[in-house]
Amino acid sequence: MSTTNAVPVQKSQRLTRTNTLQFLLRGRAFIALILVVGYFAITLWPQFLSTQNIEIVSKHVAQNAILAIGMTFVILTGGIDLSVGSIVGLTAMIAGLLMNNGIAIPALGVVVYPHTWMIVVISIVAATLIGMINGLIITRFNVAPFIATLGMMYIARGLAGLLNNGATFANLVGRPELGNTGFEKLGAGDFLGINYSIWLMLVFALVGWFITTRTPFGRHVFAVGGNERSAELSGVRINRTKTMVYMISGFCAAFVGLIIASQLVAAHPATGNAFELNAIAAVVLGGTSLAGGRGSIGGTLIGAFVIGVLGDGLVMSNVSSFWQMVIKGGVIILAVIIDQVQARMQARIALQQQQETK
Amino acid sequence: MSEMTAAALSADDSAVPEPIVLRAEKITKVFPGTVALDSVDFNVYRGKVNVLVGENGAGKSTLMKILAGVEQPTSGRILLEDNEIHIRSISEAAAHGIGIIFQEMTLCPNLSVVENIYLAREVTQRGLVIDRKTQKQKARELLHRLEQNIDPDKQVSDLRIGQQQIVEIAKALAQDIRVLIMDEPTSALSESEVEVLFRVINDLKSRGVSIIYISHKLDELLQIGDYVTVLRDGRLVETARTNDISVAWIIEKMVGRNPAALFSRTEHNIGEVLMKVEDMTLPRPGGGYVVDHVSFDLHAGEILGLYGLMGAGRSDLVDCLAGARPEARGQTTLNGQPVRAITVPERIKSGIVLVPEDRQREGLVQSMSVADNILLASLDSYSNGLFLVSSKQKEAVKGMVKSLSIRVANVGQSITSLSGGNQQKCVVAKALLTSPKVLMLDEPTRGVDVGAKSEIFEIISRLAEQGYGVIFISTELKEVLAMSDRILVMSKGAITGEFSRAEATEEKLVAASAIGHGLAGAANQNGEAQINEHN
């Protein structure tokens, strides 16, 4: 009898301890962010935490975060999108082309200059269509996402160069007589003193969080990544879900392209080169599993901040760019190792619960 | 307790105390927060089949994992031929001559049958190059011994689950073993394959190999076992000779109470024809048919049993009906209306839903919670067009958990934290939430303990009472006979027999399931794997 009394006590203590550790591991991205910010706040006191610097860092983070939010959807289904960096460049170039050269209609012998808002819409639609093509190649022709989007990475980058023979579209301010001015406001404008791009990041994060957690589509995304066959037999439209996530990814990339072009008031065909890797790093750092089915938008946002703060902090600390790369790589690998530890722990807890409920 | 049993055994004057090859003494295994094994003694008699039974979570698997080196005991000793040994890994266990066949399959689907059998034990020429010819030769002999006609070069993913299980057994036999642990080896096998397996086991026994055998199929245990050890809640309940005990005895010891009727079949009224299937056909790549022009009716409130050997086309037939095989041809009529739906989502909407055969691979999303799994197929009913309404969802999940008595502390917890039986109930719950008219259950009781099994039968009966049309597939003759109102037998893709409840007997079903197969029994025919099976 005495043993049966002793067991529950021991049980609950052990569980509390594993729960605490589990809690810490789950919040690891957030803890990492606090550590990184704390470190630079102390070593770079006081300029690192100045309002001005916080806004600069956030602006840098915003671009990567928006890309990473789109990438999160893709990775949650177990896919990957390597083409987003190129889509960023292509969108910027499309916007530049429409603004500076307009649309020539040879049959009528006229050149149509769309309004600024139309330029934005057309660029976004184009990028979303590219995402859709990615999705269709992957679902209809059964091409592995890595290969399909790798191909699209080259294609989109090539198209970006073709639009102006590799040259930059400069001075994207438009002309008042054509009614296409105001493009630079997207990058430079602010609301309540905060840059538009930061607002956009917040809106994307909020909407992304809502879609992933509160809509049937979001549930389908997780199900497809967790067990595609089960999802299919449950009536989830696998192909549609997958195509949609690549469209979302393209959509997000379009905004990043527009923001950059607007901030620079110019569109260069190499814009967004290698951005896809930063986005993937942010997603992984945020605890989303590359195998699919596990992860969150909130985590991705934090992951993007960790990478951004780390990058800017190291620059301000005058660390050589080579060491920056080494450190960034180390952080990413460490994040995945911790992720694995947590997954193993979760499996053990599941096993435990199984035996307890029995 | 164990001293008592030992005394009881030696009192049996016909038996000289049999030599014990492997002895586990006072094994305790504590996981953080739970005691999985509590000072358990277990003896493995040489050249005998030592059966281990208990409900899910009783500690059988943990004990096996300890003997196989997968887990380390918290305390206690393991003695092999009276020498204490420490087994720290599967390869160390293998070095001691202890082999294990896991319940969850451990084959690599991307490798061939031969490659799997010799994985990590490759036969090489001078330790460098794999000697493919010898490996293949030996693999073929092994498979032949198992009376299986499986092509050794075939990729494992192209085999049916039952055949994969056979390969798993062949893999264990390829090692030089004196103790072989088999964790539910028959859960995926058809009756005739089970017979083959039993012959192999007897053959191994005569060579002095000791078998540790775990299964949920109780009559099977009595047939093959020599000693039965019952575990309950991590404790040893009793060990006995099979000659001295009955199924009822085992259930009583396992459950700790008197076995209620396992098959709780209630009388229900059979109504009008609900679903009419005409000329359902699924071509086999490379000629012939997987489902060969099948026609049948299903009535409202009827439990229609579907029996057949592995590869007979039962699962393929229900897959076709569920819309999972776009290449299938044939007409389906539901309530007199032709069903034009082709895809799975459309079929679900029209009221035909499948609880698939392989729970882990096709039924669950392991990374999601209990609630999310239950809701997955019917999310549209819980959204206001755009967003999910959590109150509606909660209510639906709560209702299902209650009506199917799914044992779960919190529906937000991971689906993998449930026992097999409760996981299965979640898959059934998911299907029921789509408000179907026809429910097809493909092997719903596989790998589920006795208690949960009887609960699943209860659910099936209740559904029939409520007027659902139920198609019930099982490889276990007794289950099909006990549950069904009518039984269809399939062989080689075609229906070869139809029996009413009154006229069905085990012999008739077996005879019908062998039609179209040679006299040697149907087992050999299973070599014709269905390539598209799991695509």
Image: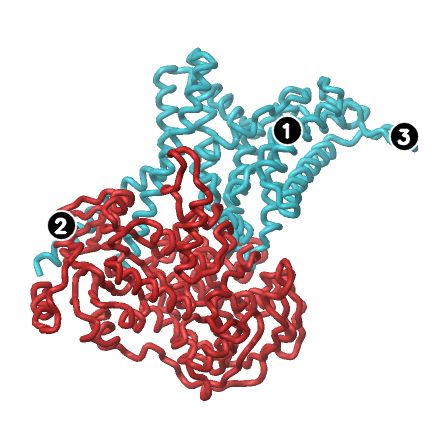
Structural crowding at the residue carrying mark 3, measured as other residues with C-alpha within 10 Å and reported as few (<14), some (14–19) or many (≥20) = few
Query: Residue at coordinates 33% horizontally, 46% vertically from top-left?
Result: A346
State the SS at label 2. strand
State the SS at label 1. helix
Q: Which residue is mark 1?
A: A86
Q: Chain of mark 3?
A: A
Q: Callout 3, which amino acid? A: Pro
* Whole-percent x, y for residue B149 in the image: 48, 60
* Whole-percent x, y for residue A42 in the image: 34, 18
- Distance from the alpha carbon under mark 2 to that under mark 1: 62 Å
Do marks 2 and 1 share a subunit?
no
- Image colour assigned to chain A: cyan
Q: Quadrant of the C terminus of chain B?
A: bottom right
Q: Callout 2, which amino acid? A: Gly
Q: Which residue is mark 3?
A: A106
Residue A252, disc: none
Q: Chain of mark 1?
A: A
Q: Which residue is mark 2?
A: B76
Res A276 quadrant in image = top right
The red chain is B
Closer to us: mark 1 or mark 3? Answer: 1
- Distance from the alpha carbon under mark 1 to that under mark 3: 29 Å
Closer to us: mark 2 or mark 3? Answer: 2
Callouts 2 and 3 close, C-beta under 8 Å: no
Q: Residue furthest bottom?
A: B502
Q: Nearer the viewer, residue B384 or B241?
A: B241
Relative to B1, is B490 above or below?
Answer: below
Query: Residue at coordinates 70% horizontally, 26% vertically from top-left?
Result: A158
